[in-house]
């Protein structure tokens, strides 16, 4: 060992040590390869558009509007009988026995609020990244987000609110109204808003949506699976009808329904109209002009096992022989009746994996308007009758409704609604807005609006971790 | 400079002079028994002259006059330095290095004399684990060191053991110790994603291991900083040893079998008892379930529904365990070549093992090769490297015995005892007995196909289902495999800069790729999809590449000032990068039953499965100072600064460290002269305290809030909020205190260590729930919120009872105690439920040991009515009768209806799941050529939840254990088995766990008994073989326990912290007889 060696070795050592220490500090902040950090998730126009799509994707979660959310509202009504007795597939929903710890109660709530939070995250993200897209584009995207938020709140508050809005003009408790993005801890405790507050917010969101959504999109598919101006208007007719505000229903519906037939929405927006073939509305490619807003499914983008509407319509539940199919005036030749199988199954949805889910259709808007008109008039409203006949005769050209009284007309419209929207998640919500008991079905007794199980309980985990939440 | 040149010149002159004046030294080296030692290295202090002793222990060496002494070194003996005086003959007696205090121990980034160690370190020598059949070395460590608790979870081949150093050290993170193999960080745990378990550590051949050092306290482990909370296991592999090339061949062959398989009812008893239960329940097969048109009339209520004879009128009595278990044969072969001379040290080995397990179709084989070489290039440079390559292939059925699987419908362990014995696996024509999908054109073999009942074993003449799936069929038609290819390689160099100052650099890579294949046939079992017939039959493969790259630089400096002040200083840096790239694919709708691979014919491609790309990076700087004064007073400290990629900016860096003190009392002159010293010849006090961390609970991107991509319908890409990060996440903190002493008695005839330890764990990461209305993904946020502690004592004793020429008797004993208590959980988290797949078995609450059993109290069986008596939260007896309508099954003693028992409300903290006392004891006797060794382990103080018993007494169609024969039958019967009511799944604990199935888990298990014979050396001379040893041994020969299950050493939930000690539907351990031979050429 000589001095040169010492010096050499030391130099090598220092060099290597320096190399070791200089080892790339950026390695300490690796970037995930399969996820985007929140810092860059809104950095490009494409990403913002994908963020907006993500809200719809959350809404179509199988536990929410992609399946179970609608099923629960159907099977709470009298039109379905449970077949399999399977506790995890809506048996307790059907027999009104769900409790606050139930997976179904927790699942729907969680999936619904996940969609709401996604909308809130996107609204915040768009504002925080103002320069990335034009102000007009930003407004349109925000309108989509608020449309989704409104739809989600509507489905949640009608199921979990203490009383339906119409029972006491919204004075009862609704659900917590979360309008800011939750991305970390903080703000856990939030009291439930009243039904009136929730509905005010829903209408505020829908009005903003109506004013800022595009009239239509370039691709036909988008006009069904993304919100546009008519979708916001259409949904407002449903919300106002639910609130019993019939003049407002008429005002909104008039924007997309002409005074006389043939009923089409007009060419300024998507020119919605009834599809001549009823069955084809529910068959591929699912993009008829009747479909105002639907949630799309594909083989690689499914609602999940035991979530799809078809598995409930064709396996878990069967149609109640004493329900709407007992209606003698609903002829077997009616296109809608031809979907009822010999074993009382319902083929509106017939494919486990790829049936799109119709959230709102033009025929519903016609019926919403018809009901509002009929209720607003003291005598038989001619336009209302024309509307309900348009819906009936599209499926059954041989029948014309001929009501004798105004009350008769209202009942005809409600009955038509029960037929037309069967299996689309309306029955429970309709009974609740009319403050009607859930009728007896099978071996189950009727459930009056005063009963505790007329609405769902608030989930146990919400009560546990949200200190301000209270049970129904 | 001038002075230096002068000095160098002087040295040069001196050396030249020396060369001219050599002398020859001769001598004999023997051991204390006067036996000549062959292969002893005799070397001059400068390393320039050296030789080895021959077979007579003689050496001859020519050395310069300048050389004043010679060093004699030999493995397992104390190195001697002898001065050369007048005589040119130097006879040396080497003392065996049997005293632990004289050993060198491996510590983090270096070695140390055990005598100088002031930390809690245990070393396991390879001799104590060699030749024992296993797949990986970690399975062999039970009872081998104080403070180390190893539980073999069950007999599934290559299922990773539960390994704990001083208790459970994390709640959601890993408690498995950090494993470092020759300085290279290792992968641990099950690398497989399917039912073919494949422990990553099985890539190391146990026979290649020289020793394993366990760093337990902060003084020892803090040099590993943020990864040290669970203790550190340093594995050192064998290296070549001085002497001529040594060639070894080791082989064993073994036969393994299951033991304590549950005694279940034979067919006659099954039929009798099930029909009794049917009668008691007044049960009738629901007519609505029968397919119309078959013309079958279900028996009236209370009439028999199970029948002894089958459809052909012949009785059937099937022992289903015969279709699940087997006697497996195993064999193992190692060849190694090793040696070392002045400059080069090398070791080469290869291994092949093929092992059949106790479960049919469960196999493991390993093909492995290992090479290492060190070369001394010159006096200042040494380079070396090693390569270990292994392919470990595992096949296993769906055993239901791995974490998350015990309730799998086709889990083999449960099928073995649940399936009705009065049906057969095969039909008369030799085909499988099963009920196929009724949607297929189906020629029903039982004429009893029920709606919604396909995908079950066929029922014979029974009127209710008679099992889940057919064990023989799913065994044969489904296939699960996992192949681990692992390459561990390193290169290293050591540069001696000046005397005492050494720079070392090591670059290593550990590449583990795993290919998991799963195939589920379309005919029967898990491959049957509930959704659509066209989806039946599924194959899914997952391929993963896991890479660790590690780069270490260390400087060590040894300095002794007058043998008074002794310093050892270490400084270093380390980079560790860990990447995983995994992807998988799935296909379903098998088109042809001929295929059993992913590449066969399927009608649809499913969404990809198992996709993952992730990485982490750890950058570290560390240092250590050891100082002692005259080898009597010790002080040591080590620090480490770690930067870890998973934490947010500002939280990335953490500091860890430990200090220790030691006092070698027995080296004090006043002590040496005392009478005490005659008995207690060695005594050292030591103590340490320090802080280390645990990063395993944090996901690689755990601090980040991230967005993921998905789909919305046809062609709409989405981006959505998928993870709520926590910018404040940081290491879990472990503060470790250790005090103890090391001792030697009677001239080291008895040596041992005693320690008291306490580990305070804080900032443990748990998922703090958020209200679901916030819509946070997963409804929780990871947070450093919980705390707990572990404390106890450890005692380790080794005794050389007899040390004679031809009789040696050694024994060891170690004992550890553990008290664990959770002291803090997050606000809003009153408890954490521990779930065994479907069943909530354990509960973690403050004030209790982690994962305490949580069950409903049972007060036996009412002698008057045969009803199970539960005890509700208010302490009231609640009588349960399944034969009543649902609403009135639970009754108080006065006959009034009681609320149904709800485990959430009525469960109680029923017992500790972690052993509180455990350890090992063993003995080894060698007499002439014979050697006998016995090793036992023991474990006390914990309960084991015998969940399988709930199934074994379940009154659905399930077969029962023979325990059920002592059922309650009439008023006055005093028994623990309630009246049998058909379909009763509540009374015996299937619906919720009850304490009637909770048992004391104490056991003493004889782990291994071996008998060996080494052929006399004189016989060997002719065959040119150095040594031949033959042996026979029994692994798990017997266990002393009151536990009624197959084995109290069990863990169906593997290494999870929250659900220890659960015996639910898992197979038991294996018992293996092996015979083998060790040859040395």
Image (cartoon, grey):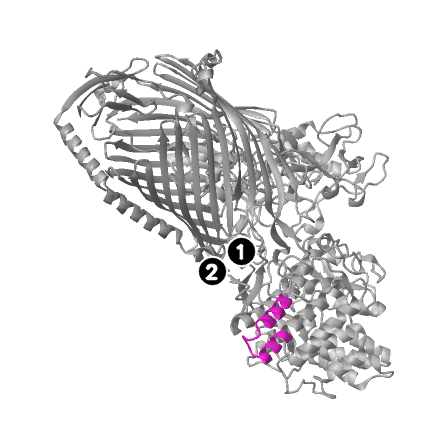
Quadrant assignment, res B909: top right
Residue B715 vs B362, above or below: the answer is: below
Q: Position of residue A345 (x, y in %)?
A: 68, 64
Q: Main secondary structure of the magenta part?
A: helix
Disc 1 element: loop
- Give whichever of B285, B146 is nearer the camera: B146
Task: Bin the neighbour count of mark 1 within 10 Å (Cα to Cα): few under 14, some 14-19, many 20 and up.
Answer: many
**Residue A33: numbered disc:** 2
Of the 4 image quadrants, the one containing the N terminus of chain A is top left
Label 2: chain?
A
Q: Give the residues in magenta.
A: A118-143
Tell me residue A144's x, y (percent): 63, 74
Residue at the far front in the pictured view: B2
Is B369 positioned to the left or the right of B451 in the image? Answer: left
Q: Locate residue B782, reporting x and y percent.
A: 60, 52
**Is A232 within the magenta?**
no
Q: Position of residue B607 (x, y in %)?
A: 51, 60
Up/down of B91 relative to B795, above or below: above
Q: Quadrant of the C terminus of chain A?
A: bottom right
Residues A381 and B769: in front is B769
Please give the chain letter of the residue carrying mark 1.
B
Residue B648 tag number: 1
Q: Visible in this render: residue A389?
A: no
Front position in the image: B548 or B450: B548
Does residue A142 show up magenta in the picture? yes
Residue B673's place in the image compared with A208, above or below, is: above
Query: Is disc 2 placed on a helix, strand or loop?
Result: loop
């Amino acid at each position: 060992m000589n001095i040169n060696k010492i010096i050499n070795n030391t130099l090598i050592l220092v060099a290597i040590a320096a190399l070791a220490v200089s080892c790339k500090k950026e390695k300490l902040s690796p970037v995930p390869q399969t996820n985007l950090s929140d810092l860059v998730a809104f950095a490009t126009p494409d990403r913002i558009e994908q963020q907006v799509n993500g809200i719809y994707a959350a809404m179509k979660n199988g536990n929410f509007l992609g399946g179970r959310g609608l099923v629960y509202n159907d099977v709470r009504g009298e039109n379905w009988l449970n077949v399999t007795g399977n506790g995890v597939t809506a048996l307790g929903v059907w027999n009104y026995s769900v409790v606050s710890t139930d997976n179904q109660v927790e699942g729907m709530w969680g999936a619904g609020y996940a969609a709401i939070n996604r909308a809130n995250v996107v609204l915040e993200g768009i504002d925080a990244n103002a320069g990335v897209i034009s102000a007009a584009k930003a407004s349109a995207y925000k309108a989509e987000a608020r449309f989704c938020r409104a739809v989600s709140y509507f489905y949640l508050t009608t199921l979990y609110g203490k009383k339906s809005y119409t029972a006491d003009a919204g004075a009862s408790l609704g659900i917590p109204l979360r309008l800011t993005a939750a991305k970390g801890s903080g703000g856990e405790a939030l009291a439930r808003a009243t039904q009136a507050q929730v509905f005010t917010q829903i209408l505020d969101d829908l009005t903003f949506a109506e004013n800022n959504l595009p009239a239509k999109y370039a691709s036909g598919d988008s006009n069904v699976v993304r919100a546009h101006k008519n979708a916001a208007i259409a949904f407002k007719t449903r919300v106002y009808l639910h609130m019993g505000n019939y003049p407002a229903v008429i005002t909104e519906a008039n924007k997309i329904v002409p005074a006389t037939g043939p009923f089409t929405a007009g060419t300024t927006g998507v020119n919605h109209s009834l599809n001549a073939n009823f069955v084809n509305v529910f068959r591929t490619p699912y993009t008829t002009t009747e479909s105002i807003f639907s949630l799309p499914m594909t083989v690689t983008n499914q609602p999940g096992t035991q979530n799809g509407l078809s598995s409930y319509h064709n396996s878990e539940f069967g149609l109640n022989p004493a329900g709407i199919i007992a209606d003698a005036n609903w002829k077997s030749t009616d296109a809608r009746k031809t979907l009822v199988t010999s074993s009382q199954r319902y083929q509106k949805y017939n494919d486990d994996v790829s049936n799109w889910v119709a959230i709102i259709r033009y025929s519903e808007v016609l019926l919403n308007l018809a009901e509002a008109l009929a209720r607003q008039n003291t005598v038989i409203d001619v336009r209302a009758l024309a509307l309900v006949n348009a819906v009936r005769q599209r499926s059954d050209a041989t029948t014309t409704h001929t009501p004798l009284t105004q009350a008769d007309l209202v009942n005809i419209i409600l009955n038509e609604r029960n037929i037309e929207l069967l299996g689309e998640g309306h029955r429970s919500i309709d009974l609740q807005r009319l403050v009607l008991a859930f009728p007896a079905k099978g071996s189950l007794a009727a459930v009056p609006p005063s009963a505790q199980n007329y609405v769902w309980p608030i989930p146990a985990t919400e009560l546990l971790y949200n200190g301000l939440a209270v049970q129904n | 400079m001038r002075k230096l040149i002068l000095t160098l010149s002087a040295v040069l002159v001196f050396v030249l002079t020396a060369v001219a004046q050599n002398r020859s030294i001769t001598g004999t080296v023997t051991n204390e028994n006067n036996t000549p030692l062959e292969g002893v290295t005799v070397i001059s202090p400068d390393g320039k002259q050296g030789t080895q002793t021959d077979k007579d222990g003689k050496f001859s060496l020519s050395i310069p006059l300048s050389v004043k002494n010679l060093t004699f070194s030999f493995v397992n003996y104390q190195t001697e330095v002898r001065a050369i005086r007048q005589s040119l003959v130097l006879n040396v007696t080497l003392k065996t290095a049997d005293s632990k205090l004289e050993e060198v121990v491996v510590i983090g980034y270096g070695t140390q004399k055990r005598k100088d160690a002031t930390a809690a370190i245990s070393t396991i020598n390879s001799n104590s684990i060699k030749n024992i059949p296993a797949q990986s070395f970690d399975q062999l460590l039970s009872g081998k060191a104080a403070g180390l608790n190893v539980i073999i979870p069950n007999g599934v081949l290559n299922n990773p053991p539960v390994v704990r150093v001083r208790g459970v050290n994390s709640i959601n993170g890993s408690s498995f110790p950090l494993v470092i193999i020759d300085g290279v960080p290792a992968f641990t745990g099950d690398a497989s994603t399917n039912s073919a378990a494949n422990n990553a550590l099985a890539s190391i051949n146990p026979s290649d291991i020289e020793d394993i050092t366990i760093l337990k306290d902060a003084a020892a482990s803090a040099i590993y900083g943020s990864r040290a909370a669970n203790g550190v296991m340093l594995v050192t592999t064998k290296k070549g040893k001085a002497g001529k090339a040594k060639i070894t061949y080791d082989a064993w062959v073994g036969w393994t079998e299951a033991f304590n398989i549950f005694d279940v009812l034979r067919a006659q008893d099954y039929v009798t008892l099930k029909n009794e239960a049917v009668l008691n329940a007044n049960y009738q097969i629901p007519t609505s379930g029968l397919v119309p048109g078959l013309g079958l009339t279900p028996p009236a209520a209370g009439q028999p529904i199970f029948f002894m004879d089958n459809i052909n009128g012949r009785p059937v009595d099937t022992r289903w365990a015969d279709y699940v278990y087997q006697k497996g044969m195993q064999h193992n072969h190692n060849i190694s070549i090793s040696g070392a001379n002045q400059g080069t040290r090398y070791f080469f080995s290869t291994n092949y093992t093929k092992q059949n397990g106790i479960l049919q179709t469960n196999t493991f084989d390993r093909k492995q090769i290992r090479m290492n070489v060190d070369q001394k290039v010159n006096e200042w440079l040494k380079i070396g490297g090693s390569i270990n390559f292994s392919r470990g292939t595992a096949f296993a059925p769906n055993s239901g015995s791995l974490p998350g699987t015990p309730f799998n419908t086709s889990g083999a362990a449960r099928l073995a005892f649940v399936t009705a014995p009065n049906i057969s696996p095969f039909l008369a024509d030799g085909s499988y007995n099963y009920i196929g999908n009724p949607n297929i054109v189906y020629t029903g073999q039982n004429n009893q196909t029920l709606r919604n009942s396909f995908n079950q074993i066929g029922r014979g003449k029974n009127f209710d289902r008679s099992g889940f799936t057919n064990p023989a069929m799913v065994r044969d038609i489904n296939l699960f495999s996992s192949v681990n290819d692992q390459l561990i390689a390193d290169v290293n160099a050591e540069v001696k800069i000046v005397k005492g100052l050494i720079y070392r650099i090591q670059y290593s890579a550990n590449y583990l790729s795993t290919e998991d294949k799963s195939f589920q046939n379309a005919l029967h079992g898990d491959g049957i999809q509930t959704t659509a017939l066209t989806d039946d039959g599924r194959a899914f493969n997952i391929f993963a590449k896991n890479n660790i790259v590690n780069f270490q630089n260390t400087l060590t400096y040894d300095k002794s000032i007058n043998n008074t002040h002794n310093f050892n200083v270490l400084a270093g840096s380390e980079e560790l990068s860990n990447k995983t790239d995994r992807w998988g694919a799935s296909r379903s709708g098998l088109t042809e039953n001929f295929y059993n691979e992913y590449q066969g014919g399927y009608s649809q491609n499913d969404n990809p499965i198992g996709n993952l790309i992730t990485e982490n990076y750890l950058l570290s700087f560390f240092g250590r100072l050891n100082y002692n004064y005259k080898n009597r007073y010790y002080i040591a400290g080590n620090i480490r600064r770690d930067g870890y990629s998973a934490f947010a900016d500002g939280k990335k860096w953490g500091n860890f460290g430990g200090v220790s003190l030691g006092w070698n009392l027995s080296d004090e002159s006043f002590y040496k002269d005392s009478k005490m010293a005659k008995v207690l010849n060695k005594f050292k006090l030591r103590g340490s305290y320090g802080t280390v961390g645990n990063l395993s609970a944090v996901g690689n991107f755990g601090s980040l809030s991230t967005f993921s991509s998905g789909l919305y319908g046809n062609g709409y890409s989405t981006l959505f909020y998928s993870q709520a990060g926590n910018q404040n996440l940081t290491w879990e903190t472990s503060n470790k205190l250790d005090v103890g002493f090391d001792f030697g008695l009677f001239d080291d005839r008895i040596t041992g260590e005693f320690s008291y330890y306490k580990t305070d764990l804080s900032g443990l990461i748990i998922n703090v729930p958020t209200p679901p209305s916030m819509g946070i993904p997963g409804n929780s946020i990871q947070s450093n919120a919980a705390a707990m502690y572990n404390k106890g004592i450890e005692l380790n004793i080794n005794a050389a009872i007899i040390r004679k020429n031809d009789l040696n008797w050694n024994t060891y004993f170690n004992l550890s105690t553990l008290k664990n208590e959770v002291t803090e959980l997050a606000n809003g988290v009153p408890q954490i439920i521990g779930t065994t797949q479907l069943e909530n078995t354990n509960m973690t609450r403050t004030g209790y040991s982690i994962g305490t059993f949580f069950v409903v109290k049972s007060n036996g069986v009412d002698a008057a009515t045969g009803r199970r008596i539960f005890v509700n939260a208010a302490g009231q007896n609640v009588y349960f009768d399944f034969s009543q309508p649902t609403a009135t099954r639970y009754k108080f003693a006065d006959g009034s209806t009681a609320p149904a028992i709800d485990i959430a409300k009525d469960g109680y903290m029923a017992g500790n799941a972690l052993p509180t006392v455990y350890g090992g004891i063993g003995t080894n006797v060698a007499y002439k050529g014979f050697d006998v060794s016995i090793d036992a382990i023991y474990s006390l103080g914990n309960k084991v939840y015998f969940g399988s018993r709930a199934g074994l007494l379940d009154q659905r169609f399930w077969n029962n254990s023979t325990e059920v024969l002592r059922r309650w039958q009439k008023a006055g019967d005093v028994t623990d088995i309630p009246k049998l009511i058909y379909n009763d799944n509540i009374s015996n604990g299937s619906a919720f766990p009850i304490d009637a199935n909770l048992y004391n888990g104490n056991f003493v298990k004889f782990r291994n008994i071996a008998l060996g014979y080494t052929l006399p050396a004189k016989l060997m001379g002719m065959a040119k073989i150095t040594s031949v040893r033959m042996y026979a041994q029994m692994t798990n020969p017997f266990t002393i326990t009151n536990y009624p299950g197959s084995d109290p050493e069990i863990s169906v939930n593997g290494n999870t912290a929250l659900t220890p000690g659960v015996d639910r539907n898992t197979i038991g351990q294996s018992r293996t007889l092996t015979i083998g031979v060790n040859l040395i050429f």
